Image: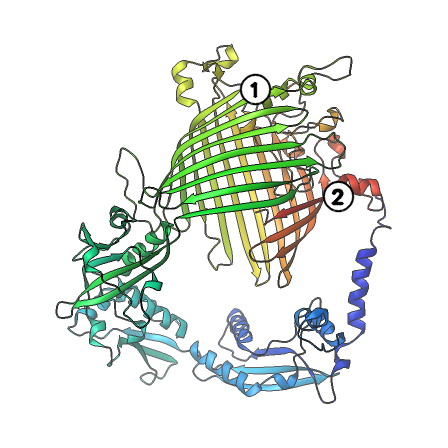
Amino acid sequence: MQKFNTGHYKTFAAFSFMLMISSCSNTKFLQEGQMLYTGAKITVKNDTLSKKEKSNLKDALQEQLRPKPNSSFLGLRPRLYVYNITKEPKKQKGIGYWLKYKIGEKPVLLGDVDREFNKKIIVNYSENKGFFNAKASSDTIAKNKKAQVLYTVKPGARYLISQVNFPVDSSVINSEIQSIKDKSFLKAGNPFDLDVIKAERERIDDHLKNRGFYYFSPDNIIVQADSTVMKEPKVELFVKLKNNTPPISKEPYTIDKTIVFADYNLADVKQGKYGIPYITDSVKVYNDLYIIDPENKFKPKIFDRALYFKRGDLYNRKDHNLSLNRLISLGVFKFVKNEFVVSDSLNHKFDAYYILTPRPFQSLRLETLGKTNSANYTGGEVNLNWTHRNFFRGAEQLKGAIYGAADVQVGGPKDANNIIRIGANAQLSIPRIVAPFRFHSSSAYVPRTNINLGYEYLSRTQLYTLHNFNTSFGYVWKENERKEHDLKVLDVTLVAPEKITEKYLEQIYGNTAAGISANPSLQRVVEKQLIFGPTYSYTYTNTMLPKKNTFYYKGSVDLAGTITGLVSGADAKAGDQKEIFQIPFSQYAKMEHDFRYYRKVNDKSTIATRFIAGMGYPYGNSTTMPYVKQFFVGGSNSIRAFRARTLGPGSYDPRTEEASFFFDQSGDIKLEMNAEYRANIYKFLNVAVFADAGNVWLVNEDDNKPGGKFSKDFLKEIAVGAGVGLRLDFSILILRLDLAMPLRIPYYEEGDRWTFDRIDFGSGAWRKDNMILNIAIGYPF
């Protein structure tokens, strides 16, 4: 093992800075009589509580206390130190102000702590959790200008619920409450808990809202507690309506008329005038809907599909929210507002008004971006996007785009093979399922039928030029915010080469005089390809929820040429390959699974993991997978210790290729695992430590890729890399820099694949060949 005796000056500098902070005490900046507040310590004294219950109560109480002490790192307070050593700025701007008040942190002093207030907070919180006889006291420990406040809590016995009562009367609303009392969150034997009582009120309100009681509120419910009837620490609860509950809140309402203002503009309404401009001479009636659209901007049937309230229906909040969400998901309205106005107070009816403000129907956007990747390519891209959000007056979205991109190889050991891409695409998205069968969706998200058409011209200078045509027809629908389906009934791709250079042909067929061996597998990159068939993907995610553990899963299936291959009896292995328009069509089955797990350690740190498994199997009319459908690993969003698309397949050694030639490595099988610890150290500044592992393999043997076939020894061919990252999170943009190095290289000799013995940080050549800097936008997963 080589000693790491060079290349560590940055680490030593950081360590010296931390030593400087620790040796220069923050307390020396305090004035006479001032003491630095270092935090609070809570002791719970109660013999009836278990160790876990005491710990939970203590942690909960700790969160309630104010103020919080100065933030610390490894027992030090660097932000407080920066504040103390920075002079008071003369102006509220500049580097001095930024250092003192943005980077630095004002000292929290003992004098800032209101101990009496905190004791009241402790007692109040304890009582809310059922400790009705709680008492709190405080003390202070001071030493060397530092002070800690000690709080002692004597909560007493915790009161349990002895019985839950729902008093009965003859009202309609009471009958509804009685019908759901058996599902109450309040259970006999459970501890008294104010948070559970609040949840019970919300539960009752939610049920009543779905039974027509639009004007009801959780505040109309009172839960009375009686602790005097028993000698034991128990409490009897009475759940009932308040005496001052308004009469309108006790009656269920039905829908009378539904009126839609399809083109409402706030600027057209005079200030102070009622917000519903009822224009009687422009009302259209469509299936019991009253639609006001003077300029006929929308077809009435889009509102009939989106709105779930019908005349005579009992109001319910589910349909209320469903209608609003579907109107929003149409994507054509900037503002969506809903109002209910009583039209018949005796019969308890109201009119439903939907007030809609359209977005501008057309938009034109120009996008430019610069990019770089670990394969030494630097370039840029220009996109011109046009969108019409109401193309056929039915909220159909027509999107068109043209783009151009160039990637230039800068540096690296290979010759420059620059990439130029020029293309255009169009998509028509219809807000319903267009099919010969009837499709009903009660989701809050409008299902869509998507028709796509695209073309791309790709030129890899000195190598080849390709034309890529693509078209698809399919459906996208969401069951809810967590589950989404994407079915392309037909997805067609045609790849046609235009020019293949002599240099590339030499690599395919070989050149004995030049010492270049043949590599027939390169032919697949530039051969004509016709791919057609259905594809399907399913996505589940709950990462948007405020939970400690969240998941993301996406599974996809791609079946190409299945029926055509079976009907035609194609058998490429036997030499009977079928063609369409003189182009052999591809026949394969492919699936891929992407599973991610996120664990929130605390408010400022997260552990993120990902596992990807994919496989493509050619059969019938194909002996190999189409190049554009194969798997790749390496790069900024994959195994970051290896340059983009340079790893695999299997233990195949890419160094055996001609040094002057470069092409992507691909495979039919993919396994990849990633783990990353992410931590926020200051506002927009985040750091990460990560490890990546994986590889790709071939299904069939390839004589030109020895070691590339998947076998029982695949675990020995897993590549491993690790590194550290810096992320600048500006909310609208996340700039990511990841520095990685390989720990296990699968194309080395089997007993010599771990690189620990090879690491020499002091060697400039080692750093150049093994330290990979990835610059990217957004998180890798």
Q: Earlier in the sequence, mark 2 or mark 1?
A: 1
Pointer 1 local density, CA inside 10 Å: few below 14, some 14–19, many at least 20: some
- Residue 489 position (above or below residue 45): above
Q: Which mark is residue 771?
A: 2
**x, y percent for residue 499:** 61, 20
Q: Which of the 4 quarters of the picture holds residue 313?
A: bottom left
Depicted 490 relative to depicted 439: above or below: above
Q: Position of residue 51 (x, y in %)?
A: 54, 71
| Closer to us: 1 or 144 | 144
- Graded by Cα atoms within 10 Å as few (under 14), some (14 to 19) or many (20 or more), the crowding at tag 2 reads some
Render colour scheme: rainbow
296 vs 668, left or right, is left
Q: Residue furthest top?
A: 575
Element type where label 2 sits in the image: loop
502 versus 268 height, above or below: above
Near-viewer residue (500 or 212): 500
Q: CA distance from mark 2 to mark 1?
A: 36 Å
Residue 451 showing in the rendered view = yes
Residue 724 lies, in percent from the top left, at 69, 51
Residue at the spot x=32%, y=39% of the render? 433
The residue depicted at 77 percent of the width and 66 percent of the height is 18
In the picture, measured across the screen, residue 100 lies left or right of residue 454, that is right
Up the image or down, 319 lies above or below 71; here it is: above
The secondary element bearing badge 1 is classed as loop
Q: Is 265 in front, or is 370?
A: 265
Q: Determine the image quadrant of residue 257.
A: bottom left
Where is mark 1, residue-wise? 527
Q: Is residue 76 visible?
A: no
